[in-house]
Image (tube, rainbow, N blue to C red):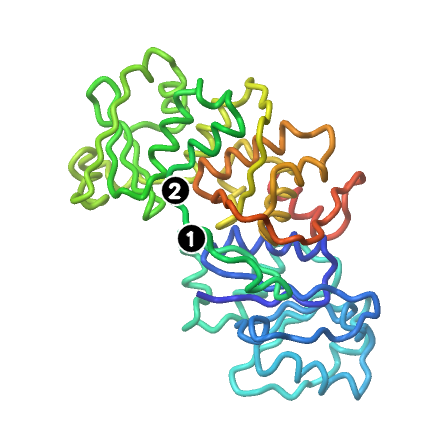
Amino acid sequence: MSSVLLAGLTDQETAALEVLIGMHWRDWKTVSLARSVSLSVPRQNSVARASDICVVDLFGLGMRRFKAENAPVLMDFLGGRSAILLVWGDGGGWLEQKLRLEPGQKIEWIKVPYDSMTVIAAIERVVPQTRGGKAAAGAASRTPSAPVSAAAAGEEGEVPNDGDVLPALRAAFPQLDRIPVVRLLARLLQPVGTQVVSVRGEPTLIADAQQSQLATSLPLAPLLKLLLTPEMMANVRVVTQPDVRFEDAVRRHFGRDAANAQTPLDVLAWELGASALRDVPMDRRADLSLRLLRMPDFTLLGSGDGMDVQLAAICARAPQSVSALARIFPRREDEVHRFAILSILAGLAEITQAPPVQQRAPEPQKVAPKGFFKSLLAKLF
């Protein structure tokens, strides 16, 4: 697993990079050091110093223009790690410098403003191949991980999760109890090994929450239609087979189509849940807190939008309560509720019983943001 230190960036740019990195390298972690008002070099704790590579905005470190005394300060901050360095305008004299690099250390320069593909390419060039470079980056690992603020590291204790999310969701949103698909998704999330879902006796889905994998005999569109039909859902049966490997069950039931049948569990769960909740008003009766385990893959989700990107970025920085998110986005409570429910039902977030870390979340933008965040949203949607 690799980790990326984000330093000297605005809250908005940090959130956008966390979303981008979380989507392309899903087993990576991000650690952020906020830009100070004084534009000074932030102090790194042990979590920040343990990061593998750095993305640094030189303006945020008070180094927009090159000065001889800044070079050793910057190199000390990097500590021999490879880095993507963001420069402004003509580069402020940095691009003409030959910095003293340690063996194996690489530096990539990016001019602001920049787009997502430029950042992805730069990261792939600097990440050591043995630590998850380009070859490993292409594989979307399903290991749960979440960005963490270096300032908040260690402040939130782990809360046990028994895998049964339905009681807490039902207490917060009683309407969910009347939606059979929600009960099915909550069942599939339980870490009990291989589960085979049959409709009228015909195996249709095979899931393993521990591997975050799912296989289906149907394309997504007809599968959604099938499971959203009340008559069909009345004939759904789920059989748990803890002693059967997921891959063996897929080959047994789907045969030669096994290789093409597999898909990430979170993607199908999100799409299925979004379809089931589309016309259902969510009246919240109780509060709950959620911790994002990994970013939704917005490149694969057909129902995700810009609001979901903002909410994911906020929840990736620290656990959040649904009521706090609703206060951040007034008059958009239904979208907040929908995001919380889908993230939990898709296994992308867990419900926490402890109060969330108090941390200021990025303010929603009333005007379309410029620069990288706008580019990311445009690319996704």
Residue 258 at x, y = what percent? 24, 39
Amino acid type at image mark 2: Pro
Q: Are marks 2 and 1 in contact (CB under 8 Å)?
A: yes
- The mark nearer the N terminus, 2 or 1, is 1
**Residue at the spot of label 1:** 140
Which dot marks residue 264? 2
Q: Observer-nearest residue: 331 or 107? A: 331
Question: Is residue 212 shown above or below 4?
Answer: above
Q: Which residue shows up at 60% across the image and 23% down it?
A: 283
Amino acid type at image mark 1: Ala
Residue 285 shows up from this direction: yes
* CA distance separating discs 2 and 1: 10 Å
Q: Observer-nearest residue: 48 or 371? A: 48
Residue 229 at x, y = what percent? 38, 14
Q: Which residue shows up at 40% across the image and 24% down it?
A: 181
Q: Which secondary structure, mark 1?
A: loop
Q: Which residue shows up at 19% across the image and 38% down it?
A: 241
